[in-house]
Image: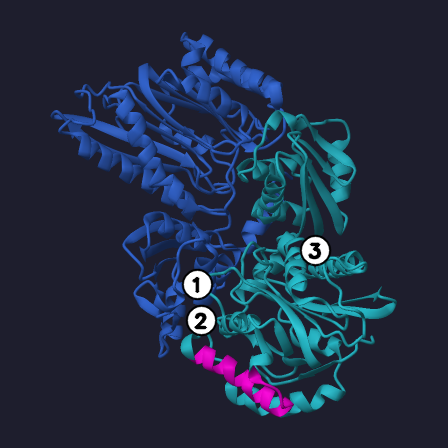
Chain colours: A blue, B cyan
Amino acid sequence: MDIKGFSFSAVEAAIKKPGRLDLALIVSETPAALAAVYTTNKVKAAPVLLGMERAESGLCRAVVVNSGNANACTGAQGMDDARETARLAAERLGIDPGELQVASTGVIGQPMPMERVRAAIPALVDGLSAGTLDDVAKAIMTTDTFPKMEVRSGMAGGVPYTVAGIAKGAGMIMPNMATMLAFIVTDAAVEPSWLRSMFRDGVDASFNMISVDGDTSTNDTALILANGRAGTPVIAADSADADVFVAILNDLLLALAQQIVKDGEGATKFVRITVKRAASIADAKCAAMAIANSSLVKTAFFGQDANWGRILAAVGYSGAEVDQGRVALYFDDVQMVRNGIFIGGDAEVRGTEVLRRNEFAVTVELGLGSGAATVYTSDLSYDYVKINADYRT
Amino acid sequence: MDIKGFSFSAVEAAIKKPGRLDLALIVSETPAALAAVYTTNKVKAAPVLLGMERAESGLCRAVVVNSGNANACTGAQGMDDARETARLAAERLGIDPGELQVASTGVIGQPMPMERVRAAIPALVDGLSAGTLDDVAKAIMTTDTFPKMEVRSGMAGGVPYTVAGIAKGAGMIMPNMATMLAFIVTDAAVEPSWLRSMFRDGVDASFNMISVDGDTSTNDTALILANGRAGTPVIAADSADADVFVAILNDLLLALAQQIVKDGEGATKFVRITVKRAASIADAKCAAMAIANSSLVKTAFFGQDANWGRILAAVGYSGAEVDQGRVALYFDDVQMVRNGIFIGGDAEVRGTEVLRRNEFAVTVELGLGSGAATVYTSDLSYDYVKINADYRT
């Protein structure tokens, strides 16, 4: 991957336990335009509070990120630790500490093992010449089973550029915003205020449309850095190349979001839930999210049970406007429900065949208007319970 | 139990499968004052739609209830089936079919096996002399592992009366209202409009304060019948005996609600979640419900992991006003968190001891006002997944 003016590094600091990469660094040679979206949880981790403060400037040179400890619910000490981490990295990089973002993911409520972070920072900075974005993707994993990276390329003013992104997810995955870390870097030049609004829209249409377990974390952070080092003209809202850039970025964000769902804790199914013909887009999203977050629906997916009744029940309590006599429901292209009741025939057999697939779609038509939304979710398996019953041990 | 003027019956109609009681009848000798609360789900089962229509009169003579089939998402045929069930029972009882309530619980979306219901009704009615309320409690069970019954007695105008209630729960348990059936009978005489408002308040403080899995069913129904056959004076809002009646009824409703949680699908823990010192009662309830419905919190309970960070995260995304620096958290009497951070010392060890108990309390103090609420919940275990992955098979 050729992404100009960015370098990457990841090391083992043994933050939770030894044996894996858990501290990583992304550096832009020159100050990059920054757009960032943080968790809406009112209990925010220290690095989120620090990041929100620093994102005001709209500029960023580097991101330090660790897994294994969320640095959340750690009070004033947690803020001091996040600041110190930024300062130590900045000093070794020879940049202003205010140009650094810090992100953390892992266990909530335990102090950062700063002695190990301090010891690891020199090697972290010194490894920048050899590291790759893929190393960073590995270092931010917690219960993730594979690293998540997507790369796209485009042209602006005849100049090629690259957009690359990594993410981690697995648990505490629920919109506002989806519970995860995501870091996007591009060497395109992008007008900063447009970057912010476009990135927020892109996050709304991707990370905010997935749910693994309905829990919103204290640490969610999605960042994009655009450093312009590819030499493109500045892409702005009214540029000829704007639409292509938006399309590329949104495609990349959605692909990362889908990877998070596919790697949901204990997931055995990847399900696209679309609600159509709702009274409004908000109703469609709300009904789709209710389906995606229903423990009964998700256990039925795990059991490969074409239990459409639970899906209708979830739509019914979602808050969306529903006239049960108008509802239709499909598993992939197999219609199960028409006018609110079971369609009969061999639908049960054919629907069950769909549920045996690793990936399938659930489509609900409400017959009330033109609102539509798609949400991506996983199932609820024994392994989800196992992973989360044992997480801290 | 001596409850005057009521008789009970339960038979095996083999509605889902043979081998258990699944069709039951409650009859009052004389028309009883009726108060009823039904599901808020917009997808409502046929018996709920029928019951809502009939509850307008404020009077009821009998309730026919079946388990094994919810008669939900069954369209016009489902309405015909519910009406026919009421009519057949009414004919054999020699009463007006409009005085009957019908309730169903079980699988959604399958037609009622009316040939088996029709065949069972004569024996159901004829069994009234021999049946007990306990038989009815058994007949309404689905994935419940034990029947739920509570009995209380009181005095009004010097005359003793009895209040008895049964309930079923287990899955699809979430407020508005808690997903279940509950039938309360009393031989006290109660002024009908006061009965309605008091019963709604009682349901709000009991069944609407429990959650097993956050799913609200299509069939929730709670009814109270008061037939006055004990010979008490009519108890009304301004009666000398009103407070005692309200206290008895609320105590009974809360006890039934707690039984439902204790028998939650796969439950190994019974947890009282209290949020105190919230900015408002609504905030306290909303934060307590977010904790109760968090899959991550519930799997930590199952794993006996004193993972208070997940509880704080749930409070943070609940929508309640939160200042994380003011939050305190206790497992029973063991304080874990003060001013938003871990208290240190031996709290981890002592908190883990609390989590090993079968029943314990989680108390969160927000430090913002005087709002308080308590919600009752269970954990999320392998068995919850197992029960619901296999439910229809």
Q: Quick one: A355 or A5, which is closer to the camera?
A: A355
Task: Say whether mark 2 and mark 1 are on the same chain.
Answer: no
Q: Earlier in the sequence, mark 2 or mark 3?
A: 2
Q: Is residue B198 magenta?
A: no
- Image coords of residue A381 (percent x, y): 53, 55
Inspect the image, locate mark 2, and give the three-letter code of the amino acid beneath it: Cys
The answer to whether dots 3 and 1 both sit on one chain is no
Q: What amino acid is at disc 3?
A: Thr
Picture quarter containing residue B100? bottom right
Q: Where's residue A198, x and y in %?
A: 28, 31
Is residue B383 visible from the viewing direction of this image? yes
Q: Secondary structure at mark 1?
A: helix
**What secondary structure is found at the residue carrying circle 3?**
loop
Tag 3 subunit: B
Q: Residue B55 appears in which quarter of the rendering?
A: bottom right
As drawn, the label of residue A312 is: 1
Q: Residue at x 36, y 77 (%)?
A: A346
Above or below, B33 relative to B289: below
Q: Please state the horizontal and vertical placement of residue A129, each as a whole percent of the image.
A: 36, 18
Which residue is depicted at the point 66% across and 81% down? Answer: B25
Q: Which residue is mark 2?
A: B73
Q: Label 3, label 1: how many angstroms apart (C-alpha)? A: 29 Å
Q: Residues within 10 Å of mark 1 (few under 14, many from 20)?
A: many
Magenta highlight on residue B96: yes
Comparing A130 with B83, the one in front is B83
Query: Which of the image's four quarters has the N terminus of chain A?
Result: top left
What chain does mark 2 sit on? Answer: B
Q: Is A334 on the left or on the right of A307, as rendered?
A: left
> Can residue A186 be spotted in the picture?
no
- Marks 1 and 2 close (CB-CB < 8 Å): yes
Q: Could you say which disc has been placed on residue B268 in the image?
A: 3
Give the residues drawn in magenta, as a range. Answer: B77-97
